[in-house]
Image (cartoon, coloured by chain):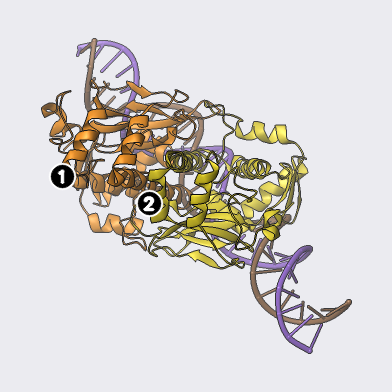
Chain colours: A orange, B yellow, C purple, D brown
DNA sequence: CGGCGACTTGATAAACTTCAAAATGCGTGG
DNA sequence: CCACGCATTTTGAAGTTTATCAAGTCGCCG
């Protein structure tokens, strides 16, 4: 099942609301009272879908809004001094992108659609104002940012300490967890990104990603059919990456 | 000049206040009105100094507070499933540590003093409440967290794309920038951390860090005397890491 | 059906790690 | 204040992992 076939993809028109969005349990509205969701709803602008390859915002562009992915997938990347692209994240439905732009009033990364993708635009100044009136919204925002910080730190552990096998396994399990949380299969899904993008993200060459996946398949850990991935031996995969940290949380990449 | 010899180290007693703290221009009070600084001041608890090796908080421990480093240096690290320590950051005076604990109400990392270190404890629930009353404080908090996210993303770029030389050069330049911002020399400073800790942080073996530094010295980029580092050829070092990103910001690690 | 990009596979090379050992620095107790 | 012992750092040699280069295959879109 692909991440792009989210139930909301066609049912959610530009006029749709947080209240009847299937993602509200994961997105910002979580733990908000109905009337508060209404207020939040009023500052959110539903955007027309991005086509594959479309840019949501550019590195260096003035920061105005954060965006919640509604359907599809985004990648964010940084263009390094030497001109290469370094992917810093992939974003699934309900996830917030653009938070790193607050500090400098400019996005330090570019966000690009990996497939047809819809987003909710949330003008940050409005969100900030609203968060003063709604403590639970403010708390939710702090939580989302805090979560991002700790996820990124796990990613540093991955990049700094893990070998190719562990990196790829972590990546697949992380996707699995995110899909599961969104009501999709945890063991069977379609990658929205290319092998090259996976390698870029994990600090590996394309060829290495390909070889590792092939070997995983040979060892009956996963089944690979192009972009379709099926995890055959979840336990073994988890063992490979080390399952839980001291917080009892599955080690997200 | 060592980071531990901050002017505030001896002048700031446990009863000291944000108002007369030399770090207020860098820390949370920045851009706050006097009366607001007073309010912030009242929720902050100055703690007795940590000795080298003391733990500020443990991975897994319930989250209560964020901490601002007043003097000295902290490291944060994650104990991986395989039991090794992965350092996720070093913290200098004025920097906030513990923000990643908000999400799960538990610190996902351990914070440990690298030398004698004093911190201000800021109970987060109080800070959060106060931020509702003081919009500029709330904005400041968002900025600090946003900044952390974008710094961590730069760190991912470093870990994923850079070679040993670039990693070490980036690390030294990042420290240089942070010292300079705090009024110390940008070209001459003392490392609070061991080579092993540097290597751990950068995803390199100790031996590699040592070799790179020795080579940098041979090539007259830096001068090394134990933990004392002097940057001789700043321009060349900057060239090595690629000086500025598209936001015009020096590429922090 | 053709062409082009994405993916796979193999061979070689480079970068870094690991292992080993010596040198240096540092804190502690006599 | 010095000497001892341990930890850190440096240096060398060998070994691995992964990147790079090259070529071929697959699959998709026009």
Between A147 and B207, the residue placed more toward the observer is A147
- Give x and y (percent) for residue B231: 74, 42
On screen, residue B56 versus residue A187, left or right, reads: right
Residue found at x 63% / y 45%? B175
Label whose residue precedes the other's in the sequence (1 or 2): 2
Residue at image coords 47%, 53%: A161
Mark 1, secondary structure of its residue: loop
Task: Give the alpha-carbon distance from disc 1 to disc 2, as whole Å.
Answer: 26 Å
Residue designated by label 2: A166
Q: Can residue A150 be seen in this view?
A: no
SS label for mark 2: helix
- The label on residue A103 is none
Q: How many labels does the image show?
A: 2
Whether label 1 touches label 2, CB < 8 Å: no
User: Is residue A86 among what the camera can see?
Assistant: yes
Mark 1 or mark 2, whichever is nearer to me: 1
Q: Which residue corresponds to the image point at 66% horizontal and 31% vertical from the top-left?
A: B239
Mark 2 surroundings: few (<14), some (14-19) or many (≥20) residues within 10 A: many
Quarter occupied by residue A97: top left
Badge 1 local density, few (<14 within 10 Å), some, or many (20+)? Answer: few
The residue that disc 1 covers is A183
Q: Is residue A227 above or below residue B145?
A: above
In this view, D4 is above or below B51: below
Q: Quadrant of the C terminus of chain B?
A: top right
Position in image of residue A164 (x %, y %): 41, 47
Q: Position of residue A194 (x, y in %)?
A: 32, 32
B146 w.r.t. A57: above or below: below
Tell me the quarter of the picture where residue A95 sits: top left
Chain of the residue under label 2: A
Residue B9, given in percent of the width and then of the height, sits at 68, 58
Chain under label 1? Answer: A
Q: Do labels 1 and 2 share a chain?
A: yes
């Amino acid at each position: 099942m692909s991440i792009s076939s989210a139930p909301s993809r066609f049912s959610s028109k530009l006029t749709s609301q947080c209240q009847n969005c299937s993602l509200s349990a994961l997105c910002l509205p979580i733990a908000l009272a109905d009337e508060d969701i209404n207020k939040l709803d009023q500052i959110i602008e539903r955007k027309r879908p991005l086509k594959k390859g479309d840019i949501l915002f550019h590195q260096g562009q003035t920061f105005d809004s954060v965006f919640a992915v509604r359907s599809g997938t985004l990648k964010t990347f940084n263009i390094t001094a030497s001109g290469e692209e370094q992917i810093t994240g992939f974003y699934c439905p309900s996830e917030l992108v653009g938070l790193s732009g607050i500090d400098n009033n400019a996005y330090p990364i570019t966000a690009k659609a990996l497939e047809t993708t819809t987003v909710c635009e949330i003008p940050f100044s409005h969100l900030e104002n609203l968060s003063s009136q709604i403590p639970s919204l403010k708390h939710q925002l702090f939580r989302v940012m805090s979560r991002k910080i700790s996820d990124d730190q796990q990613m540093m552990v991955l990049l700094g300490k893990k070998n190719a096998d562990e990196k790829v396994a972590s990546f697949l399990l992380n996707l699995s967890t995110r899909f599961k949380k969104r009501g999709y299969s945890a063991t069977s899904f379609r990658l929205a990104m290319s092998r090259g993008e996976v390698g870029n993200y994990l600090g590996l060459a394309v060829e290495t990603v390909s070889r590792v996946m092939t070997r995983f398949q040979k060892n009956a850990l996963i089944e690979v059919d192009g972009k379709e991935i099926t995890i055959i031996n979840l336990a073994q995969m988890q063992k490979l990456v080390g399952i839980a940290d001291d917080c009892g949380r599955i080690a997200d990449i």
